[in-house]
Amino acid sequence: MMKILITNTVSLNGGDFAILEGILRLLRMNFGQDTEFIIYDNQPEIARKYYPDLKFRKLIYKNYWQKKSL
């Protein structure tokens, strides 16, 4: 099974999600329907509520800046 990371998305923006959905479809066509996606979003907790079939995680740079500001 192929795993693909998608970073720097704003899934709660309708236009951005439409682009993301198109990307997911194209990647599944090329790598197979069982391809797993991990999507790094700026608000993963909320995005999970709207799109429960997708795996969301907090943007990497947000983790970095939160630790650095402590």
Image (cartoon, grey):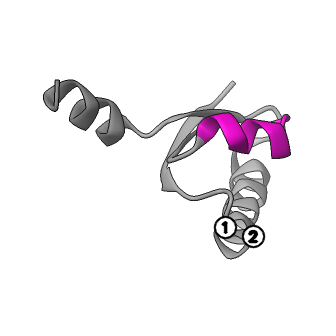
**Quadrant the N terminus occupies:** top right
User: Relative to the observer, which residue lies in front, 67 or 34?
Assistant: 67
Quadrant of res 68 = top left
Magenta stretch holds residue 55 = no
Q: Can residue 37 be seen in the rendering of this structure?
A: no
Quadrant of res 16 = bottom right
Number of numbered discs: 2
Residue lying furthest front? 70
* Mark 1, residue position: 13
The local secondary structure at tag 2 comes to helix
Identify the residue shown where x is 72% and y is 54%.
24
Residue lying furthest bottom? 15
The local secondary structure at tag 1 comes to loop
Dot 2 or dot 1, earlier in sequence: 1
The image shows residue 58 at horizontal and vertical percentages of 49, 34
Question: Relative to residue 22, is residue 33 drawn left or right?
Answer: right
- Amino acid marked by disc 1: Asn
Q: Which mark is residue 18?
A: 2
Identify the residue shown where x is 76% and y is 49%.
28
The image shows residue 62 at horizontal and vertical percentages of 34, 39
